[in-house]
């Protein structure tokens, strides 16, 4: 596997781990109104693509982008949320109050919290929790742990032992 494929796989695992830690069960298919994406650094082109996708497909999107060229772990997050006739875009970061509560997304301006609602859709709430930096570090540690475990499972399934290896 080349470096580009490895980076893409790591980004995909990070997005899957974020989804899992936000409360979506591992074997649960997302509702058609929610999408998690990953890719390059957040710029005008990425934002435009996400807004068009949200409008055309009627989806709320959490996007994890690379922070700098050559770094494989996502370091920037963008939430694209629909609200009747408007699209709201928030730079945000994952946040966790403790190891048991689902991860939520907190806007960088500190005015909006995004979480998984009981109906399987995202909820946008006014306000943000305290200790943003500490909660962000806890959330990233959880996401990285789950992504690492996912990596092992993916490798195991991608490269099954041959019958002659018994």
Image (cartoon, rainbow, N blue to C red):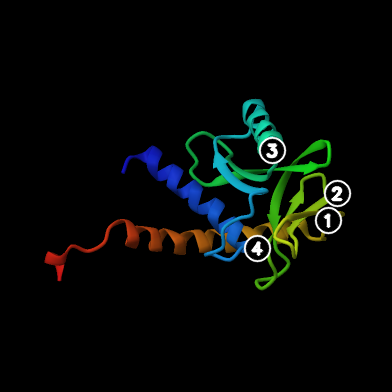
Residue situated furthest bottom in the rendering: 100
Residue 50 location (% of width, % of height): 65, 35
Disc nearer the start of the sequence (2/3): 3
Q: CA distance from mark 2 to mark 3?
A: 22 Å
Q: Are marks 1 and 4 in contact (CB under 8 Å)?
A: no
Q: Quadrant for residue 82, please give it.
A: top right
Q: Which residue is mark 1?
A: 128
Q: Which residue is mark 2?
A: 111
Q: Which residue is mark 4?
A: 138
How many C-alpha atoms fall within 10 Å of the one at disc 2: few (<14), some, or many (≥20)?
few
- Secondary structure at numbered mark 3: helix
- Residue, x 38% and y 41% (percent of image)? 5
Q: CA distance from mark 1 to mark 4?
A: 16 Å
Disc number for residue 54: 3
Q: CA distance from mark 3 to mark 1?
A: 24 Å
Image-based side of 27 in relation to 60, left or right: left
- Residue, x 69% and y 38% (percent of image)? 54
Disc nearer the start of the sequence (3/4): 3
Disc nearer the start of the sequence (2/4): 2
Q: CA distance from mark 2 to mark 1?
A: 6 Å
Q: Are marks 2 and 1 in contact (CB under 8 Å)?
A: yes
Residue 42 location (% of width, % of height): 63, 34
């Amino acid at each position: 596997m080349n470096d580009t494929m490895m980076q893409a796989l790591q980004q995909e695992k990070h997005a899957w781990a974020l989804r899992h830690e936000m409360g979506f069960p591992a074997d649960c298919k997302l509702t058609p109104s929610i999408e998690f994406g990953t890719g390059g650094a957040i710029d005008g082109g990425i934002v435009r693509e996400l807004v068009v996708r949200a409008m055309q497909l009627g989806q709320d999107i959490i996007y994890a982008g690379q922070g700098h060229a050559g770094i494989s772990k996502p370091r920037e997050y963008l939430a694209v949320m629909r609200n009747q006739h408007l699209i709201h875009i928030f730079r945000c970061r994952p946040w966790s109050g403790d190891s048991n509560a689902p991860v939520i997304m907190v806007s960088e301006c500190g005015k909006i919290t995004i979480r998984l609602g009981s109906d399987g859709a995202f909820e946008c709430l006014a306000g943000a929790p305290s200790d943003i930096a500490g909660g962000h570090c806890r959330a990233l540690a959880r996401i990285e742990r789950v992504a690492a475990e996912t990596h092992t499972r993916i490798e195991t399934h991608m490269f099954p032992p041959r019958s002659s290896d018994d």
